[in-house]
Each structure stands twice: as structure tokens, then as C-alpha cells.
Amino acid sequence: MTVTRRCETPQGKAGSSIAESLAPLQDLNFGQATEKARSWAESHGTGDRTGVWGISGAAGTVLSVVGTLALMICCPMFAIYMWFTFTQLDGSVRKFTEYAQAEGLQGLWRAWPQPSLEAWLVLLAFGSFQAVLQRYAPGKRFEGPITPNGNIPVYKANGVTSYLITLAAFLTAWGSGLWNPGRVYDLFGEMLAALNTFSLIFCVFLNIKGYVAPSSTDSGSTGSFIYNFFWGMELYPRLGKNFDLKTWTNCRMGMMGWAFWILCFAVKQYQTFGHVSNAMLVSVLLMEIYIFKFFLWETGYWRSMDIMHDRAGYYICWGCLVWVPAVYTSPAMYLTMHGVDNLSPAAALAIAATGAAAIYINYDSDRQRQVFRATHGKAQVWGQAPSFITAKYTTGDGQEKTSLLLTSGWWGLARHFHYLPELVGAFCWTLPALSAQCLPYFYVVFLSLLLTDRAFRDDTRCASKYGKYWAQYTKSVPYKMVPLVF
């Protein structure tokens, strides 16, 4: 049985869509369907379940399970204690170590914030507002790439509109005295604790939904509760036909939250010291440019590994709901109380210019590939006809498809070149912290590891998908991320 359908209800065809959804039940073989779901789950978005670091067999399986559990236990602790170190211990790792040694487990427990009603209400208001904007703000229809099982997810591209409406609401609420954004800094530990609790419940919900009511055929169980919870079961989980949950967690709660929590930190610095420092201004400005760029390119994000390959589980949903606000905002979190008048105007200008240039190159490289794909290879690249490789592949339901692999422009320099300017931009919005403490630079280190791992994972996935065509591509573009180096 082969079924290709879009992840939406066509306008004006409610009756026919019900008939179409029931039609496959006429010849459904549940044994084959279960086996197909398991096969899909084991080969799409679950990482290596049988080995790690080249160790296979029983030992590799054990290491993989232990590593997965360790991440789920340790990452929430790191996120919370990172906040605690920034806000209570001047961002000093040494002071945190001394505190842990002196106070022991009881002290660490006392340092763990408890969600307050106010923190929950801030998150409820923000999350609900973003959900309403995602669903109802105007935007163009956008069809994502065909999925492994032949489905085509459909989105409403309204990220920029949602960002601007949220910014207007932020300024209106602050300017009118209806809300004090500086309170977010005071409540942030409680908000992280609340987000951590919510994300765990949310991931349980996603697993139950994946079992009883998957949104598409791109779903399946790995046979392991641990892996189902960590990696997720559904590739494109939705509420109804139109509300995409990964867009809400990744783009609206994660990226939009990042944009506005750091503005709240800047407000807190202004309220505390009477002005916003050069360091805070440069850091927040560069992050806002980067996030606005993200929403300009949101349709490209729907073609990225996060959406196309990584399923909705703890790995990506908890990451966007908790890790992003805790870690991605950390340069501004530290600068709120420690970045006052520590950056000269000349240094601030140089860092801002370098960071802005890096963010533009990151955007232009993504745009270049997006336009190339949209025009089926007919658009010029750097004023010339593009060079590319025509690669054929087969989807999970047996259909033969074609992709064009760009080998000129930015994409002729390295297969994942766009990661390099992204890292430079991140370094620039962290650099205003200067060298007083090392913890503010954790985000840059983490991002370097994340993007390098993603480059390797993407290469592995593409080698499996395209076979000999990917071998041709790597021969034409031999460097992975850094031209002439790596």
C-alpha cells in the first residue's frame, strides 16, 4: 500500500478528505504496517541505537542507552546551575565549585528554583500568544520537502510577521506600564524550572500521541521506551491538521523566546544602572539581527535537519524549550549585571561590524541554496550559471526523486560552509563579556560541537540517501565546514 498525502486538510474538501483518510483501511495489513513503522523509526532520526564511538555489540548498546539517560539527567541540571552561577555567583565556575563543596547536596537542592505562579503565567501568556500568531497571523502557504514516506508538510510562513507583532506588543506593554520586562530576569530561574517540568510532560504527551494518533505515516516506535522518549516518534506531529508542534517548540518558543528574553535582560540592566552598556547593546543587537534573519529564512529552516530528520522527542523539544533559553541567552544573562562600561566604543563598533557581516554571510549562503532549489538550478550564483550534481534517490514508499546538489558559490567552498559564519557571529555576540569569566563562552563551545556533529550526521545521512551521487559531490566539494582546513 502506498499513500502520499499532504499534512493538512485541503480547503473546501472536508468531506472528500474524510473519505480519503478512510480509504487506506480497506486493504490495511496491520502486521505489515507495524513492521514498516518500526523500520522507519529505526532508520530515520533515532541516531545510532546499537553503538557509540565505534563500539558495537552489547557494549555499544549499553553505552548508547547509558549515554541517552545521562543526557536526560545531566542537561537539566546544567541548565539550571548555569543560571544559578550567572545570577548568584558572578558567572564564576570556581565559586560554583566552592559552593558545591561547602554546601553539598542540600545546598545544590536549595539552589534549584521552584516555579512560581508568576513564572507560569508569563510562560502561559507568551506560549499562548505565539500559538495564536502561528495559527492566525497572515503568511504565505509553504510546502516542505517530501518526507521519507511520501508526505508533504504544509506550513504558513508568518515568522517575520509574528516577530514584528510580538515586538510591538512587548513595547506597548512596557511603555504603557502594563508589564515590567525586567521581571523576567528576576523570574528566569523559576521560568527555566517551569519549562523543564512542562517539557517533560510535553514529551510524554508526544509519545502517547505517536502511539495512538500520529499525524502522518512518518511515525513509528523503535521498540524502546527510552529511545521513543528521547528521539521521539513523529517527524511532523500536529494538533489538528494545521498546528505544527515542532514549529511551535523550535521557532516560536525557542527562537522567539530567545529574542525577547534577552530584551528583558537589557531592560533589567537599564533599570538597575540607568543605561544599557556598550557590551550589552552589541551582544543583544547581534543576537536580534541573527534571530530576525532566522525568521526571514524560516522556510529554509523547514528544510533543515531539525525538521526533516530529527523527530519530535526530548532531544529537540526539551532542547528548544529549556536549553535554548538557558544557554543561548547566556551571554546577555551574564552581561546584565557584569557588562557595564567594559567595552570601548571602538571595540564595540568593530565587534558589531564583524558579527553583522558574519550573520549576513550566513543568511546569504542559506538564501543562495534556497533560491537555487526554488528555481531548479536556473538562478545565477555569483553572477554565473551554477554548477551542480543531479542526484537521484528513492523515498520510503518506493518513489524515485531527484535533488540538485549545488557545487558553486558559498556551497563550492565547503559542504556545510554556512556553519562557519554562524560560529563567527556567535563568538562576536559573546565577545563583549571579554575574559573575566569562561562560562559566558560555553555557548560558543557548545555550538561548535553541535554544528560539527550535525555536519557529520548530515554527511552520513546524505551518503545513505544519495549513494554514488554523494560520493561525486564530496569529490567536487572536499571540505566539510572550513575551506582548505576541514
Image (tube, grey):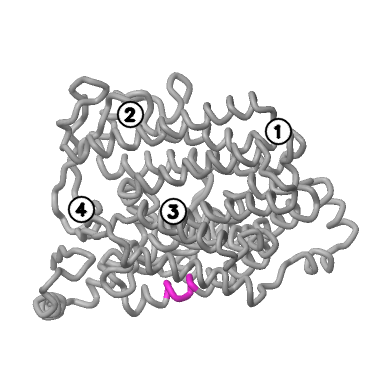
Please determine whether, in this image, residue 92 is positioned above or below residue 312. Answer: above
How far, Cα to Cα, is label 3 from label 2?
Answer: 26 Å
> Secondary structure under badge 1?
loop
Q: Which of marks 3 and 2 is nearer the N terminus?
A: 3
How far, Cα to Cα, is label 3 from label 1?
Answer: 37 Å
Q: Name the amino acid, label 1.
A: Leu
Which residue is under mark 2? 411
Q: Name the amino acid, label 2.
A: Trp
Q: Residue 434 carries which label?
A: 1
Residue in the picture at 53% in, 45% down = 53
Asked whether disc 3 touches disc 1, contact meaning CB atoms under 8 Å apart, the reply is: no
Which residue is under mark 3? 47
Residue in the picture at 44% in, 19% down = 484
Part of the protein shown in magenta: 202-207
Instruction: State the image coordinates of residue 237 (x, y, percent, origin top left).
Output: 34, 67
Q: Name the amino acid, label 3.
A: Gly
Residue in the picture at 90% in, 58% down = 102
Judged by depth in the image, the label closer to the viewer, 2 or 4, is 2
Left/right of residue 255 with respect to residue 117 in the rendered view: left
* Overall secondary structure of the magenta section: helix
Judged by depth in the image, the label closer to the viewer, 3 or 1, is 1
How far, Cα to Cα, is label 4 from label 1?
Answer: 49 Å
> Secondary structure under badge 2?
helix
Q: Toward the viewer: 143 or 480? A: 143
How far, Cα to Cα, is label 1 from label 2?
Answer: 33 Å
Q: Earlier in the sequence, mark 2 or mark 4?
A: 4
Instruction: State the image coordinates of residue 425 (x, y, percent, origin top left).
Output: 52, 34
Instruction: State the image coordinates of residue 87 (x, y, percent, origin top left).
Output: 75, 54
Please determine whether, in this image, residue 288 is positioned above or below residue 176. Answer: above
Which residue is under mark 4? 395
Q: Give yes or no for residue 204 being in the magenta stretch.
A: yes
